[in-house]
Image (cartoon, rainbow, N blue to C red):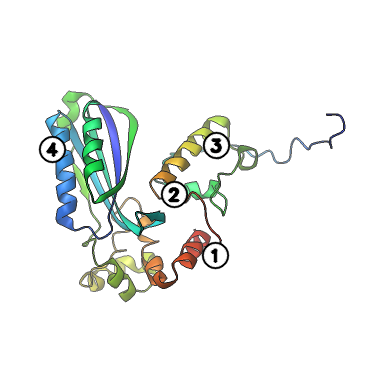
Amino acid sequence: MRMYEILLLLHPEITDERISAIVGRMEGLISGAGGKVTEIDQWGVRKLAYKVRKQPKGYYTLVKCAAPTAILTELERTLKLTEDCLRFMTVNLEQEVEAAQLATIERVHKKPSQAPEETESAEEFYEPEAPAEAPAEEPAAEAAGEKPAPAPSEQAAAPSEPAPAPAEKAPDAPEGVEKKEEEK
Amino acid sequence: MSATKPKRHFQKRKSCRFCADKNIVLDYKEIKLLRNFVTERGKIIPRRISGNCAKHQRALTGAIKRARNIALLPFTVQHA
């Protein structure tokens, strides 16, 4: 069975239940066909490089799975019909897994430590120098629904960086984009 | 062809960064790495300037294009 990874770009104002519903549906399809979802990594809300369906930000979720090839078309069709899903990208990781080994792979689920909504208010509340202070600030800011905190736990630390700064610059969006490009 | 100015063939003999360090994985999700190979305006830097070997330049281009499609990298950057 091949290993695939699907990166979903969801609407930024999506709720946890809707995300679970989408991922649950995918999992149902994959397991039904004899595959297994091995990892779900929720990156959280990120500023997009360009507006997708008029949205400047989006919620990224990565789903890694071992699945038979036949189910992919069905999976992608389901994602296309999902309103919340703005974009998706399926990549064939060049890895093969024996069906027998599937049970041994454990399912990992990584989340940003708090709810994906309230990104605007949370980030304005917080100082822009997020990544360095994130671990220390975590207990205090968690009540406020802080986003950059997951930098240590998440494998992709990059998403936490752009999140605070662009929200601060939300009023002057084009300049925000420029500045972000420069910073990087 | 004889009337053209002589071209400088060997401007910079840079080695391929990915051949030198085999541990770097070219992933469309690693945009910090990919940004090094993209100009300010978002264009992909040609191989003769970046110094990559053909194989890695192809992989890099593929990764950049994937990242562009999923809005991790811009197609073009408009100067304000």
Callout 1 amino acid: Ala
Residue positioned most to the right: B3
On residue B31, which mark appears? 2
**Residue on which the image places disc 3:** B20
Callout 3 amino acid: Ala
Labels 2 & 1 near each other (Cβ < 8 A): no
Question: In the rendered view, does B80 fall on the left or right side of B70?
Answer: right
Residue A27 coordinates in the image, percent (x, y): 16, 39
Q: Quadrant of residue B45?
A: top right
At a point 86% along the width and 29% down the height, the residue shown is B2
Cα distance between the residues tagged 4 and 2: 31 Å
Q: Are marks 3 and 2 on the same chain?
A: yes
Question: In the rendered view, does A105 fall on the left or right side of A92?
Answer: left
Lower sequence index among marks 3 and 2: 3
Residue positioned most to the bottom: A125
On residue A28, which mark appears? 4
Q: Dot 3 surroundings within 10 Å: few (below 14), some, or many (20 or more)?
A: few
Callout 4 amino acid: Gly
**Residue on which the image places disc 1:** B80
Callout 2 amino acid: Ile
Residue A49 coordinates in the image, percent (x, y): 43, 54
Cα distance between the residues tagged 3 and 2: 20 Å
